[in-house]
Amino acid sequence: MPLGLLTDFYQLTMAAGYFQAAKTSERATFELFVRKLPHNRNFILAAGLAQAVEYLLDLRFTSGEIDYLRSLPQFRHTSPEFFEMLAGLRFTGDLFAVPEGTPMFAGEPFLTLRAPLVEAQIAETYLLSTIGFQSLIATKAARVVKAALGREVVEFGTRRAHSPEAGVLAARAAFIGGCAGTSNAEAGLRYQLPVFGTASHAWVMSFATEREAFEQLQRLLRENTVYLIDTYDTLEGARRAAALGPPLWGVRLDSGNLVELTPAVRAILDRAGLRDAKIMATGDLNEFKIHELVAAGVPVDLFGVGTELSTSADAPSLGVVYKMVEMDSPNEDRRYTLKLSEDKATLPGAKQVFRYADHDLLARSSECPACPGGNGRLDTAVEALLHPVILQGRLIEPLPTASQIRQHAAECLGKLPSPCHSLFESHAWRVQVSSELEALDAQVRRGAAR
C-alpha cells in the first residue's frame, strides 16, 4: 500500500522547497524521542518499530497521488522536476533504533534516521504516529499487567479504539506490554497473537432461556466454552453453568460488585466439582481497579481490559518529537543543529544511549564511554541501546516476532527497580549526559547565538 500521503502537508511543501533550494544532495539526521513522560508514567515501553520499518521500506508516491499534489494551489509554481523526483522516491537512508520492548526515558532517542533531507523530512509524521501510539499502549499494558500480579490480562479494546486499525495496533502493542492475547481476530492473524472470546450478552438474549444459550454454546465450543453469566442474575447464571458440568473453560463476569460476586461464583463452581474452571473479570477495568481487586483477594484467574487499555485513557497522548540534530552537505563540514526555544530546547548531534544497572548515559554516537581502558570493547555490564536496522535503504536482518518482543520487554522490565513500576508514585530514572555531548551542546549554542 502506498503511504506517501500519510504525512502532514507541510512535510511536502518543505520537500518542494528543499528541491527548489538544491538541497536534495544534503543528508539530515533526525532523532525521535519523548520530551517528558506523561503523568503516572515512570518509563515508556518502546513499540511500533516494525510498522516504522514497513513504512520506510514501502515509501513511495503513486501517479494518482502526484496528480493530486499537482492540482493543489500551494504547488502551482512548483517545477515539474519536483514531481518527477517524487515519482521515483524511495527510502535510501539508515535507521538506528532501540529494540521494541525496551523501557525508555525522557530525552532518549527511540530511533535515529539519517537520510537525504527530503526522505528524512517526509517520514516524520508517520514515524511519530506509529511509535508514539504503540509505545503509549504498550506502556499502559505493562502497568495493567503489573497490577494483576501474575494473573493474565487480555486486551479487549478494539470496539472502543479510535479506529479499527488503531484497534489492531493497540492489540499488538498490548501484547508486547505483557498481555496474554487479544479479542481482535485480525491482530491474531497478522501478528500471531493468542485470541480470546466466545459469546456476548446478545448470544444469551437470542435464546428463550439462559440454560438453552449455555447448552448451545457448550455444544459448539466444548472445552473452550466460556459462559457469560451476568446477563440476568449472575449467581443464578453461575448455578446454570455449574449444572451443565464439563467440558468448559470457565465463566466471565462483566458487571456487578466483583469483590462480592467472584467468591460466590467460585464456591458454586467448586461445589459442582469444577475446581479447574476459570473466572474471568471484565467491565471498565484498569490498573487501579485491578490493583484493588487483587488486594481484596478476589478469586479471578484473568482480567479482560478494553477501553482504558486501547486508548490509554488516563494518559491518552505522548509528547513524542522528531528533531534534526545534524546536517551533512557535499560542500561543507558536518553542521550540528539544535533548538533553543524555551521548554523545547534540544541537544545537537547523533546520540547513543548506554544503559547501566542503575542509570543511563546519553552520549554522542561516536563515543564509547563504557569501554574500559579505551580498548574499544563495550563493558558487558553496559548495553548500547540503539542498533542498526536499515542501512542504505535495506533491512539488515529480519525483525523479531511479537512473541519475541514480548519476551524481551518482560526481561527489560524485570531489570528495572521496583519504584519504576509504581502505579501511584513518580520515580525518576537517572539519565546522565556525557561530558562530550555537553561540550558539543555548549559549542553549538555559542555559534547559534552569533
Image: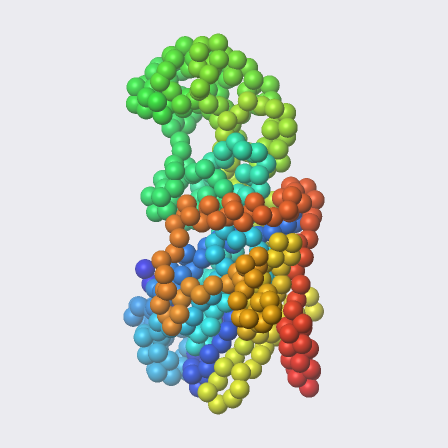
Above or below, 342 against 199 in this view is below
User: Residue at image x 47%, y 65%?
Assistant: 96
**Coloration mode:** rainbow
Q: Position of residue 348 (x, y in %)?
A: 60, 74
Above or below, 249 against 180 in this view is above
Q: Position of residue 36 (x, y in %)?
A: 64, 58
User: Residue at image x 48%, y 23%?
Assistant: 279
Q: Is residue 12 visible?
A: no
The mark tally for this picture is: 0
Above or below, 148 against 60 in this view is above
Q: Could you tell whether 88 is left or right of 331 in the image?
A: left
Q: Position of residue 85 (x, y in %)?
A: 35, 78
Q: Is residue 221 visible?
A: yes
Above or below, 427 against 60 in this view is above
User: Residue at image x 41%, y 57%?
Assistant: 51
Q: Position of residue 406 (x, y in %)?
A: 46, 46
Residue lying furthest bottom in this view? 331
Q: Quadrant of the C terminus?
A: bottom right
Q: Could you tell whether 27 is left or right of 366 in the image?
A: left
Q: Quadrant of the N terminus?
A: bottom left
Q: Could you tell whether 6 is left or right of 327 in the image?
A: left
